[in-house]
Image (cartoon, rainbow, N blue to C red):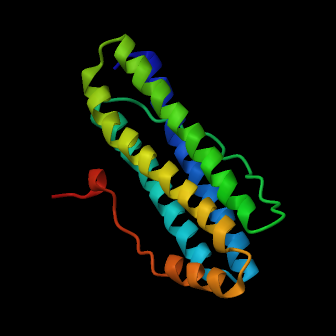
Amino acid sequence: MDAKVAKLINEQINAEFYSAYLYLSFADYYEEAGLKGYANYYMIQAKEERDHALIFRNYMHDNGEKITLTAIAEPECAFEDYLAPLTAALTHEKYVTALINGIYAAAEDVKDYRTINFLKWFVDEQLEEEANADDMITRMKLFGGDAKALYDLDQEYASRTYATPAPLVVA
């Protein structure tokens, strides 16, 4: 594997673990605010981000590459209202999309078709992540000011369940 591509994937592993840490802080914020459904949503997001890190880790090992884990930065988690974590999540997902695109571009530069193929799952995943984050913002703006509607949204997010991502499912 090209050294630059390997370096970027290693950095992505750490970025995905940071994402898990960030979403755990969002879950804590909502839990402490009494919105257990939103907390559930972000606990599941934290698990998914951890899983993304493990998918990248497995790919590196499958290619005989060394993993270098770094310290995880403390996330900013001082929020002024229920909308703030949602907008932070969309901003963060756009950042992660840019990171994935950077790895993809580096792999294209060196004609690393295996990595390009591997990254296609993440490209699709990021489309879904950004769409979900945007939808949550829209719904909070529309309904978050009404206690009953916010309760209904919270109940909906409480019903979300965790599913192991396809690349981690062992056949």
Quadrant (top left, top right, bottom left, bottom right) of the C terminus: bottom left
How many numbered marks are there? 0
Q: Residue 56 falls in which quadrant of the image?
A: top left
The spot of residue 22 in percent (x, y) is 65, 55
Above or below: residue 156 compared with residue 19:
below
Residue 96, picture quadrant: top right
The quarter of the displayed image where residue 123 is located: top left
The x and y percentages for residue 35 are 66, 80
From the viewer's perspective, is 150 left or right of 117?
A: right
Q: Which residue lies furthest to the bottom in this view?
A: 148
The outermost residue toward the top is 110
Q: Which residue is painted at 57% across and 66% down in the image?
A: 42
Residue nearest the viewer, comparing 125 with 12: 125
- Judge left or right: residue 108 versus residue 40: left
Q: Which residue lies furthest to the left in this view?
A: 171
Decide: is 111 above or below 11.
above
Residue 48 horizontal side relative to residue 64, left or right: right
Q: Above or below — where is 136 with respect to 116?
A: below
Relative side of 57 to 76, left or right: left
Position above or below: 40 against 89 = below
Q: Which of 68 and 133 is in front in this view?
A: 133
Q: Where is residue 16 in the image (x, y as percent from the top left)?
A: 53, 46
User: Residue at the spot x=56%, y=46% of the render?
Assistant: 93
Q: Position of residue 61 (x, y in %)?
A: 33, 37
- Residue at 46% from the left image edge and 29% from the top image edge: 101
Q: Which quadrant: the N terminus?
A: top left
- Image point (55%, 75%), residue name: 40
